[in-house]
Amino acid sequence: MLAAGPRFACLRALAQSPLKLLVLGGTNFLGPAIVEEAMARGHEVTLFNRGRTNPGLFPTLETLHGDRHPQSPDLRALAGTRSWDAVIDVWPSDPHMVAATARLLRDRVGHYGFISTTVAYKDLTKAGAVETDALADDLTDAAAWYEFDKAQCERVLGLIFGERQAVCRSHILAGYRNPSDAFRMWAVRLARGGEVLAPGDGSDPVQFTDVRDVAAFAVLLAETRASGAYNVAGPRRSVMPFGEFLGQLNEILGRRARLTWVAQPFLDAQGVRPFSDLAMWVPVRTSRRPGFMQVSTAKAQAAGLTFRPLEATTTDEMRWFRDTMPATYEFGVGASNKGFPAARERALLAAWHARGR
C-alpha cells in the first residue's frame, strides 16, 4: 500500500475515477505486479502481448494479441479508434518498438508510462545521479547496447508524447516471480546457512527495489498524469552498506549463516567477478560505474514512491524460489546467471583462511 498523508491524498485525488489502462506486456515479472496493483485500485485493465508468456495468468482480463518486434510487427489489435486513459509499457529496450507503438497510440492515449533503467545514465562514475543528468548517447562497448537503447527509447517517447509521458528508471528488482538470481542468490545462500563468503569489507553501497513498489509507483504516475523521469531504487535511504544488507537478510532468515568478509584484492586475484559471481556487489574502489548503486531517489519519493520492508521482499523471493526451483538448485551452474557453485565458494574460503600460513 502507498503511504497515507496529505501529499499522497492530494495526488490520489487527481484520479477521481477508475482508469482505462492498457498494459503492454504484463505477464512476466514487473508486468503482473503492475496489473495486480492496477486491479486492486479498481482500474479497468487491458493487456497487449504475444500470448506466449504465462498466457493463462489473467484469464478474466481482456487481452489483445500482437507482436512489437520491428522485423515482424503486428500491431493490428491496437489500431482503430479505441482509446485508453493511460498506457504502461513494461519491458522493451528497442526504440523502434517504442516508437511504433507510441505513434499508433499518440492520439488515443492520454498518458504514456515507460519502464526504463538507472543504467541509462551517461555517467555513473559519481554518486547521486539525478533525473536531469545526461543519458547514454554513444556505444563504448558491447555491454552498452542495453543502456544506450533504453536511453533512446526515452528520447523517442519524449518526442512523441512530450509532457504526457512519465519514465520509471528502475534499479535491480526483487520479489515474487523474479527471473533473476541477483537478490535471490544472497537470500537463498544465507537461508541455507553455514559459512558464507561476503565480499569486501561491507562498506560498498547497494540498491534494489521490491517489484511491487515499482508497480505501485508506475500506477500512481498514470493516475496523477505525472510527467518526466523518476529514479526508482530502494531502500528508502539512497545508500545501504553491503554489510548492513547481508546482516539484515541473515537476521530475517533466522541467523543460520556465518559471514566471512573476504578482502577485495584477494577476490580480484582469484578471478572473482563483482556483480556476476557475487551478485549486487559493486566495489566503489575499482568499478568503472561506482555510482550505479548510489542514484538519488529524492524526486520519486517526493512524488509518492514508498518502500516495503526488506522482510516482505525476502519472503516473496523465498516463496518464489521454493515454488519454482528444485531444492538442489545451484547458483552459477547451468541456467543460473549469478553466483558461483558451492564447491568454488568452499575453495575460496579455504584459501582465504590459509593465506599467510
Image (spheres, rainbow, N blue to C red):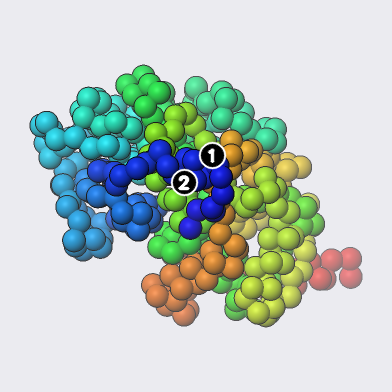
Q: Position of residue 343 (x, y in %)?
A: 61, 73
Quarter of the picture containing the C terminus is: bottom right
| Residue type, numbered disc 2 | Phe
- At label 1, the amino acid type is Ala
The Cα–Cα distance between marks 2 and 1, rounded to whole angstroms, is 9 Å
Whether residue 281 is situated above or below residue 84 in the rendered picture: below
Name the foreground residue: 61 vs 191.
61
Q: In terms of image quadrants, where is residue 109?
A: top left
For the residue pair 11 and 53, the one nearer the viewer reads as 11
Secondary structure beneath label 2: helix
Comes first in the chain, label 2 or label 1: 2
Horizontal and vertical percent for residue 351?
Answer: 76, 68
Secondary structure under the numbered disc 1 in the rendered image = loop
* Residue at 64% from the left image edge and 44% from the top image edge: 293
- Residue position marked by numbered label 2 in the rendering: 217
Q: Position of residue 181 (x, y in %)?
A: 50, 61
Pair 2/1: label in front:
1
Label pair 2/1, CB-CB below 8 angstroms: yes
* Observer-nearest of 47 and 74: 47
Which residue is identified by label 1?
303
Residue 309 picture quarter: bottom right
Density class for disc 2 (Cα within 10 Å; few <14, some 14-19, many ≥20) is many
Q: Residue at x 59, y 25 (%)?
A: 133
Q: Is residue 334 above or below residue 10?
A: below
